[in-house]
Amino acid sequence: MHPIVKLVAQRLALGLLLLFAASILIFAGTSILPGDVAQQILGQSATPEALENLRRELGLNEPAITRYFSWLGGVMQGDLGTALTNGRDIAESLGTRLSNTLFLAFWAAVIAVPLAITLGLLAVRYKDRWPDKVISAVTLTTISIPEFMIGYVLIFFLSIQLPQLINGMEFLSDGVRNWMLSNLRFSSVALMNDSMTLIEKIKSITLPIMVLTLVVLAHMMRMTRAAILNVMQSAYIETAELKGLGMLKIIRKHAFPNAIAPIVNVVMINLAYLVVGVVVVEVVFAYPGMGQYLVDHVAKRDIPVVQACGLIFAAVYIGLNLVADIVSILANPRLRHPK
Amino acid sequence: MNDQLKHLSERVTKGLMTRREFVGRAAALGVTAAVANSMLATAAKAAGPVKGGTIKLGASGGESTNTQDPALTASEVPLYNLRHWGETLVDVAADGSIEYRMAESVEGSADAKKWVFKIRKGIPFSNGQDMTPDDVLKTMQRHSNEDSQSGALGIMRGIENMSVDGDNFVVELAAGNADLPYLMSDYHLMIQPGGGMDNPGAGIGTGPYTIEFDEPGVRHGFKRRDDYWDSENRGHAEFSEQIVLNDATARTAALQSGQVHMINRVDPKVAGLLDRAPNLTVKSVAGRGHYVFIMHIDTAPFDNNDLRLALKYAINREEMVDKILRGYGTVGNDMPINGGYPLFDDTIPQREFSLEKAAEHYKKSGHDGSPIILRTADGAFPGAVDAAALFQQSAQAAGIPLEIKREPNDGYWSEVWNVQPFCASYWGGRPVQDQMYSTAYLSTADWNDTRWKVPAFDEMLLAARAEIDEAKRKEIYSKMGRMLRDEGGLILPMFNDFVGAVANNVGGYEDDPNGPLMNNKAPIKCWINA
């Protein structure tokens, strides 16, 4: 068997074991929280009778172990069950939320990853000169500002001030202004539904994409810069220089392929963040992703939903790490052809 | 009204001019802002409802765990949902009177023990069936039977028997209760076909809308029904949409950029700033909710009425309303009732801030000067920690050694409130005085958080409950209010307003003290001016 296939198989098996362990931790964690789903649903107006009736119907009177294994049994057969709070099919609600989350993460990544790497390469090319300094200063500033703050600032300028500014430009004709108003619309509410076309969807999430890009840019950019600078110290780079190759060509053809492994690792960490860590951005833009869905159900102690979300998040992390490892191996001839 | 003003106000109604511009131009014509605003309201009403369009609400208080089952409704967004598709037997109108919905009249016996609701005929559910008294009975049974999980179970407790008699729905109580019709306005009690026993979350009712899409925690959409029975007064917009915006800044931004027409829960801190925006108006209405500092009157040193009075005189109510509520509220009078309640006696004198009286009572109490500990937390009510600090300062000026202990939010309601002898807390209002007093000031009440257990007070409460003569009831309630004010364990410095905001192209908005945004009915009672 090819060593890579073997590695993937091993890692997948280990991943399943990790998922199992994660599900136990999540279940235990949610069970320790004070109060249960019946109390959270009925709130302050609950009478003891109503609580008891609801608990009985939801099966909360069963011991925790029994509930865990009946849940596990369902999952093994591909049945995630229904939410305790509103009786909805978890797989169905989760499916919509997950696809929204992946949609946002995908478009944020499509913009952020190439941009970060390009900026990183430029920073190396102009090392210690003003482009390098500007790139670092700007990206480090945006990563230092909390993401909700970036969101608010963008909303203030692009959603609220910009239309007023356009309205005030009386030197333009009405037609031009109306065109600008309808095409330069930045929605502060990122609506998402099936009746929208792809273009409408992307327009709707323009601001969240911008925020996420600004948040993840610095990490990837700095890692690209550091990894390539590291390679640039090597003897073969000097050789390339002595051959008379241009700086950009050296970086592109000789330095970058050898710096891929650390770059891919940090890219994968950021992709995982884009999938599992964006709840704050979801709240600011009211985006129907998985983060908000998970937080709501934790607050209501709706264990089956929390479990399902937890499994998906864990699977995303494990999967992306696996991809990072495989790419590192493929990018490195010494690992690709082990002795 | 001169012609020019009339012309201007019509322009505003049609959306050709902003309200602010109008007030400015009216001022130029020598009209005060207050008069200008009331002229606008008249003009909007005269224009009449505009049918059609889409009305959008950006609302806080929605979670992805929400359901359409009225029995399990506890937060604000599901409440807006219920109002769209369902209706109760009666509503409480903005002026505190009973507005008949599914019942066309109600009659109580002389001892207020038997209540007969005459049910309207020929009103269709959204599934085509006609609503019958039997549906009403089944609905009430679902909220009160042994297996009930309903949030309304508590208020259904006093009911001994319910039955159908021809076109009537009959309720018999164990003890007289003149306020029973008000209890039937509870939002949990939406009339559903077959009582909603089979499918409680189906969203089928007699309301002006049907559910178009239902994505809990994200958005809810409704389409107007053509066969709605009261289409003159409700259900003006063709479509109504609620977008869940739990983040305060997201809500205000959505309204400012015109993505929604109205929002709930505007933070008093930004309300003044928001009101300056040209295309919207902040709407605040005095409600019945209040922020309190509560003392257990059975625990030293709070068992001494002079010490309680000293603390009551030592709190600067105006300052609280000013700094904590930013003016979006009214001063309280150490009783949980204000002008928002029916049968309120407005001759009860307002307690004023007086350091001399506070010092005098404190001296009379003979307190040993050991620190009096007030517990508070951010979650007790918005601004509770700051309010406690203000209280501490004024109390110390009167020589009262008040000390603040800050508690964590998590567990405040189980570890501190109703457990510790002196802490900050809040109450939402109730539609009638009886319900407010029964919830927290009856000897046997679960939530008697001031340990107010006074037999004479209980007797008055029960007597008032069964009293049909309104003048007599008002008198009893007045006595009860005065008693609590002078002897009770609650320091009630302020009633908080419901603060929302509405775009200027929305017509039909009227203040309603029963709840936020017209008691959650703004989307079904307002319209969009084209």
Image (tube, rainbow, N blue to C red):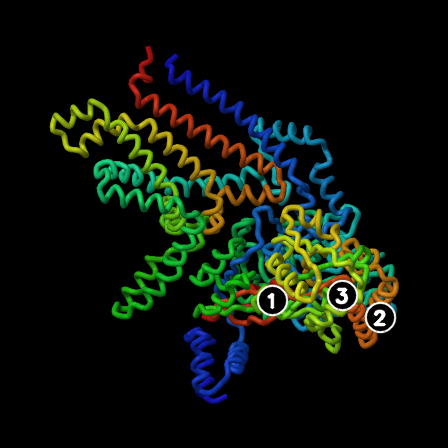
In the image, residue B495 above or below residue B407: below
User: How far, Cα to Cα, is label 1 from label 3?
Assistant: 43 Å
Of the residues under marks 1 and 3, which one precedes in the sequence? 3
Q: Which quadrant would the N terminus of chain A be assigned to in this image?
A: top left
Is B274 placed left or right of B302 in the picture?
A: left
Give the mark count.
3
Mark positioned earlier in the residue sequence (2 or 3):
3
Q: Nearer the viewer, residue B454 or B30?
A: B454
Q: Which residue is mark 1?
A: B518
Q: Is residue B139 above or below residue A27?
A: below
Cβ–Cβ below 8 Å for labels 1 and 2?
no
Q: On the picture, is B52 further left or further right than A107? A: right
Q: Which residue is at a point 26% across and 31% down the rendered structure image?
A: A229
Subunit of mark 3?
B
Q: Residues within 10 Å of mark 3 (few under 14, many from 20)?
A: many
* Residue A219 drawn above or below residue B226: above
Q: Chain of mark 1?
A: B
Per the model, the C-alpha gap separating discs 1 and 2 is 30 Å
Question: Under tag 3, what secondary structure?
Answer: helix
| Image quadrant where one finds the C terminus of chain A | top left
Disc with the residue nearer the chain's start (1 vs 2):
2
Q: Residues within 10 Å of mark 1 (few under 14, many from 20)?
A: many
* Residue B211 against residue B317 in the figure, above or below: above
Report which residue position mark 3 lands on. B362
Residue A184 coordinates in the image, percent (x, y): 33, 57
Q: Chain of mark 2?
A: B
Residue sitting at the far top = A339
Determine the residue positioned at 81% across, 69% down: B483
- Between residue B396 and residue B349, name the one nearer to us: B396
Q: Which residue is mark 2?
A: B467
Q: Amino acid at mark 3?
A: Tyr
> Which of these two is toward me, B89 or A144?
A144
